[in-house]
Image: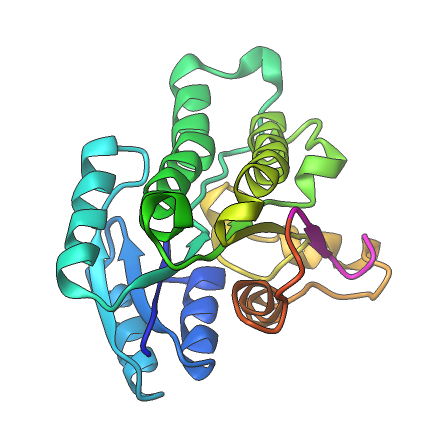
Amino acid sequence: MSQTVLITGASRGIGAACAELAARQGWDVVVNYQHNAQAAQHVVQAVQAHGRQAWAMQADVASEPDLLRLFANIDQQCTPLRGLINNAGVVDVPCRVDEMSWPRLERMMRINVLGTMACAREALRRMSTRHGGQGGSIVNLSSAAARLGGGGQYVDYAASKGAIDTFTLGLAREVAAEGVRVNAVRPGLIDTDIHASGGLPNRVRDLAPTVPMGRAGTAHEVAQAVVWLLGNDSPYTTASLLDIGGGR
């Protein structure tokens, strides 16, 4: 039976890599995006090339009306929802806490924390046996920053990912008896364009020597861990925080 995974922020980077790998593992994929419809359509085509169904759906995870519309469209158009990868997230330019504006803090938490929690809420209403669902899996994208703290660069981002770690552990235990597994992956230094969006386009090059393995990771390497946690090869794994950081 076909089953669908929703991947938020799936038009680029880790989300796009997860979409293609999930398709290889037999998942139909909802490619969520906020702005770049063309990039999302490229991901849809990559999924379809593996013989799976795919839908590009626009929604801002920081907006509850957008999320409700997204899940309503999934209900109407897609095969049963059995997976959620909470990948959408933002960083910001380097900044000390005593220089952070309220709009920056609010944006960070609305996207990285509230969006993740609300997407999980809506997915549970469809997947949990308590609500008549058939079970499923949620994988949250955290970050090594939750361990490292982000001092001098983005403590707000690190704090948002620390919240994701705590949310993952609590939710996993809350729904463990309802057929839903919840885990998180904590990528370290990964070569994606998120660093440029945070004002540090050379961050990967500059920090690669600090990684014990001597290099940055790739989006595909993170996706391998995410899709393993998503699927049937990890049936007894829940409430886990998996570091993908080359030893850093």
Whole-percent x and y of residue 111? 39, 35
Q: Quadrant of the N terminus?
A: bottom left
Q: Is residue 32 left or right of residue 102?
A: left
Reply yes or no: does residue 244 show up in magenta: yes
Report if residue 195 is visible in the image.
no
Residue at x-position 71% and y-position 31%:
149
Reply yes or no: does residue 4 show up in magenta: no
The picture quadrant where one finds residue 49 is: bottom left
Whole-percent x and y of residue 120? 41, 42
Q: Is residue 206 left or right of residue 130?
A: right
Q: Is residue 231 left or right of residue 73?
A: right
Image: magenta residue range = 239-248
* Residue in the foreground of this view, choosing between 78 and 94: 78
Residue at x-position 39% and y-position 62%:
12
Q: Is residue 175 above or below residue 163?
A: below
Q: Is residue 183 left or right of residue 133?
A: right
How was this image coloured? Answer: rainbow
* Residue sitting at the far right: 212
